[in-house]
Image (cartoon, rainbow, N blue to C red):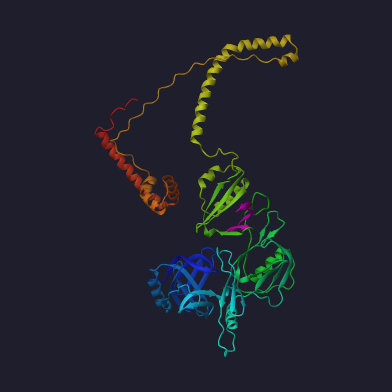
C-alpha cells in the first residue's frame, strides 16, 4: 500500500451547503481542500481518535473525531473504498474504521445525546440526525420545549431555520429542570452572539449597499454589529473569508465587501487613528479579521483611472473588477471567481445591440456566469488581460479575427461570413464590368462630337442664366448584344471501382468516438453530435492529435499505393460520360 490515498469529488457539509473538493490521507495528516472556497482543513494524524463509516445521501461517508473535540464529515466515497481506507487507517493511524448504520424509520421520539460539539438524536441506539452545536445561533426555552435557531448560509439553496424539541417532565423528586438542563448543554457549545462589554470602535451612519441604508457599525472583539433604524445585523468574524477594497468607477467612493467564512486572532489597534473613512474601516477590519485586503491590480479600463468595467449580471447593473487572481462583481449579488476555479471564458456578441458584448465565465463545476452589456471599447483591455493571465478563451480564433486596430467590434453584422452572399456579389460585379465595357465603347464613338458642338453653340448665343438652366442632352439607349454563354464543363463520371479516398485525422477520430458521444448524451441529434465532436476535438491534447495524424498519413499512403496498382491494372481509363 502506498504512503498516501487521494480522492476527488469528496463533499464537505458546511451549514447546509455541500462543497466538493479533494481529500488526501497521508501518514502525517489528513488534508481536505475545498474547490469552491479554497479553504484547507488539516487534521494531524496524532489527533485522530475515532473514524466511522456510514451510508449517507451522496453514497458513503466518513465521520472523523479528534482528541481536541472537533468533528469532520466527508461524503462521496464508493462502497469499494472501504477496504482500502480501513487498512490504511489501521496501518498508519492505529484507528479502526467502524461501520454504523443510520436510522431511517422516520420516528420522532427518541433520545437526545450530547457528544462533544454534536447533538445526536438516536432511536434504538441508531442515529437519526446530528446537529453541530456551533451552528446554533439562539436557544429559547418554553414550558416543555427547547427551540434551536441556526446561522444561515447564503450559498445553501434550502436552509434549516429552527428545530423544536419536546422535553418531557422528569420525576418530582429530581430538583433539576430537564428543559433548563437541555438548554444549558446546548449553550455550552453553541455559537450564540452576545454583545458583552463596550465596542472597540463605532462608525456612525455609514452608508451600506447590502443591507441597503445607513447603519451604525459597532466593532466588537468577536463580531461586527450593524445597528439601523429598523433592522440589526450581527456578523461573526468566524464567517469572514476575504476582505476587498475596491474604488468606484467615479473615483469618489470605495466598496468594502466581506466574503464570508474564517478568522483567527486579534491584533492590537492604535488608540488614536486618523485618515479617510474607508481607510479607517479597512484598517480596523484587517486588524480584527487578520486577513489581507485585496485591491485591484494593474488593470485599467477604457475610462481614465477606472480599474473596473460597467456591466450587468442577472438584470442588475454593477461593476466587474479584474483582480490579480480572479474577478469580483459588485454589488447585487456579489460574485467572486478565482482563476483556479475557472474552466474557460467566452466573448459573445450582445443580444440587443452590436455596441456591446457579453463576457461569459464557466467554472470547473459547470456553473456559468454571464456579464452582459459591456461597452465595446472595453473589449481590447479585457481581452489582453484575460490573455495575459493565460485563461482558456473558448473562441480565441474568432475573436482575434474580429479584433481591429482600435480593439473594437464592427458596427455592422457583416463580419460573419455568408458564402451565398459573397458568391452573388462576385457574379454581380462580373456582370457590371462586362456591361460597362460595351457601353463605354459604343457611347464614345456615337455622341462625342455632337456633345462638343451643342456645348459650344449654347455658350455663345444665350446668357449665363440660360446656360445654367440648360441640361446636357440625354444619351440614347444602346441595344447590347448578348454574349454567347460558354458551354459548361463536362462532369466526370465517378468511378465506383476506384479505391476510396482516405479520411482525415478528425474523421478517423470522429468515427471511433461517435458511439461514445451518443452514449454520454442520450437523445442527441446528428447536428448536435457534430457540434459536440468539434468542441471535444479542440480540447484534445497535442500528443493525442499527433497519433491521429499519423493514422491519417498511413491511410493516405495506403490509398496512393492502392490507386497506383488500380491504374496499372487499367482502372480509371474509361472516358467521362457526356451530359
Please state the horizontal and vertical placement of residue 5, each as a whole percent of the image: 42, 69
Q: Residue at x 58, y 45 (%)?
A: 351
The secondary structure that most of the magenta stretch takes on is strand
Which stretch is magenta?
310-330
Please state the horizontal and vertical placement of residue 234, each as a whole percent of the image: 66, 70
Classify the position of the C terminus by image quarter. Answer: top left
Q: Is residue 16 above or below residue 360?
A: below
Classify the position of the N terminus by image quarter. Answer: bottom left
| Residue toward you, 384 or 237 | 237
| Residue toward you, 14 or 307 | 14
Q: Is residue 222 left or right of residue 54?
A: right
Residue 325, visible in the rendered structure: no
Q: Is residue 546 above or below residue 466?
A: below
Please state the horizontal and vertical placement of residue 2, each as a whole percent of the image: 39, 70
| Residue toward you, 328 or 298 | 328
Extreme residue in the bottom direction: 173
Q: Is residue 459 left or right of residue 104?
A: right
Please state the horizontal and vertical placement of residue 196, each as a whole percent of the image: 68, 77
Q: How many marks?
A: 0
Extreme residue in the left direction: 569
Q: Residue at x 53, y 20 (%)?
A: 437
Q: Is residue 260 magenta?
A: no
Q: Is residue 450 left or right of residue 469?
A: left
Q: Is residue 325 magenta?
A: yes
Residue 443, visible in the rendered structure: yes
Amino acid at each position: 500500500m502506498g504512503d498516501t490515498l487521494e480522492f476527488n469529488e469528496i463533499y464537505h457539509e458546511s451549514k447546509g451547503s455541500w462543497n466538493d473538493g479533494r481529500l488526501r490521507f497521508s501518514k502525517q495528516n489528513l488534508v481536505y481542500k475545498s474547490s469552491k472556497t479554497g479553504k484547507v482543513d488539516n487534521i494531524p494524524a496524532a489527533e485522530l481518535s475515532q473514524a466511522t463509516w456510514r451510508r449517507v445521501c451522496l453514497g458513503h461517508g466518513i465521520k472523523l473525531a479528534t482528541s481536541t473535540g472537533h468533528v469532520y464529515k466527508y461524503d462521496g466515497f464508493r462502497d469499494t473504498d472501504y477496504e482500502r481506507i480501513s487498512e490504511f487507517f489501521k496501518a498508519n493511524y492505529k484507528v479502526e474504521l467502524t461501520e454504523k448504520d443510520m436510522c431511517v424509520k422516520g420516528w420522532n421520539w427518541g433520545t437526545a445525546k450530547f457528544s462533544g460539539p454534536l447533538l445526536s438524536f438516536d432511536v434504538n441506539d441508531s442515529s437519526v440526525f446530528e446537529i453541530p452545536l456551533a451552528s446554533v445561533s439562539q436557544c429559547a426555552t418554553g414550558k416543555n420545549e427547547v427551540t434551536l435557531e441556526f446561522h444561515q448560509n447564503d450559498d445553501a439553496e434550502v436552509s434549516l431555520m429552527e428545530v423544536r424539541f419536546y422535553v418531557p417532565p422528569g420525576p418530582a423528586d429530581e430538583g433539576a429542570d430537564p428543559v433548563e438542563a437541555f438548554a444549558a448543554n446546548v449553550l455550552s457549545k453553541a455559537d450564540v452572539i452576545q454583545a458583552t462589554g463596550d465596542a472597540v470602535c463605532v462608525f456612525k451612519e455609514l452608508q451600506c449597499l447590502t443591507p441597503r441604508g445607513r447603519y451604525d457599525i459597532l466593532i466588537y472583539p468577536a463580531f461586527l454589529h450593524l445597528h439601523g433604524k429598523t433592522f440589526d445585523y450581527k456578523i461573526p468574524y468566524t464567517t469572514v473569508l476575504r476582505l476587498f477594497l475596491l474604488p468606484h468607477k467615479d473615483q469618489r467612493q470605495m466598496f468594502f465587501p466581506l466574503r464570508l467564512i474564517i478568522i483567527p486572532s486579534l491584533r492590537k489597534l492604535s488608540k488614536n487613528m486618523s485618515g479617510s473613512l474607508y481607510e479607517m474601516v479597512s484598517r480596523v477590519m484587517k486588524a480584527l479579521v487578520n486577513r489581507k485586503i485585496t485591491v485591484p491590480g494593474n488593470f485599467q479600463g477604457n475610462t481614465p483611472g477606472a480599474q473596473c468595467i460597467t456591466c450587468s449580471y442577472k438584470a442588475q447593473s454593477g461593476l466587474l473588477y479584474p483582480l490579480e487572481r480572479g474577478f469580483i462583481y459588485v454589488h447585487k449579488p456579489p460574485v467572486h471567481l478565482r482563476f483556479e476555479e475557472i474552466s474557460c471564458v467566452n466573448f459573445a456578441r450582445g443580444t440587443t445591440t452590436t455596441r456591446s458584448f457579453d463576457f461569459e465565465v464557466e467554472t470547473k463545476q459547470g456553473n456559468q456566469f454571464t456579464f452582459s452589456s459591456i461597452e465595446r471599447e472595453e473589449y481590447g483591455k479585457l481581452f489582453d488581460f484575460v490573455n495575459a493571465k493565460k485563461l482558456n478563451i473558448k473562441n480565441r480564433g474568432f475573436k482575434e479575427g474580429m479584433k481591429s486596430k482600435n480593439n473594437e467590434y464592427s458596427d455592422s453584422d457583416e463580419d460573419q461570413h455568408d458564402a451565398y452572399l459573397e458568391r452573388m456579389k462576385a457574379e454581380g460585379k462580373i456582370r457590371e464590368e462586362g456591361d460597362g465595357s460595351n457601353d463605354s465603347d459604343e457611347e464614345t464613338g456615337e455622341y462625342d462630337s455632337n456633345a462638343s458642338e451643342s456645348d459650344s453653340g449654347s455658350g455663345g448665343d444665350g446668357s449665363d442664366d440660360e446656360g445654367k438652366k440648360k441640361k446636357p442632352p440625354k444619351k440614347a439607349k444602346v441595344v447590347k448584344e448578348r454574349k454567347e454563354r460558354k458551354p459548361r464543363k463536362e462532369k466526370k463520371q465517378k468511378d465506383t471501382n476506384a479505391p476510396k479516398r482516405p479520411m482525415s485525422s478528425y474523421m478517423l477520430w470522429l468515427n471511433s468516438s461517435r458511439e461514445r458521444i451518443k452514449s454520454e448524451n442520450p437523445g442527441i441529434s446528428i447536428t448536435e453530435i457534430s457540434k459536440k465532436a468539434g468542441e471535444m476535438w479542440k480540447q484534445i491534447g497535442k500528443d493525442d492529435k499527433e497519433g491521429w495524424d499519423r493514422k491519417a498519413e498511413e491511410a493516405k499512403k495506403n490509398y496512393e499505393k492502392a490507386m497506383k496498382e488500380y491504374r496499372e491494372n487499367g482502372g480509371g481509363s474509361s472516358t467521362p460520360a457526356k451530359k
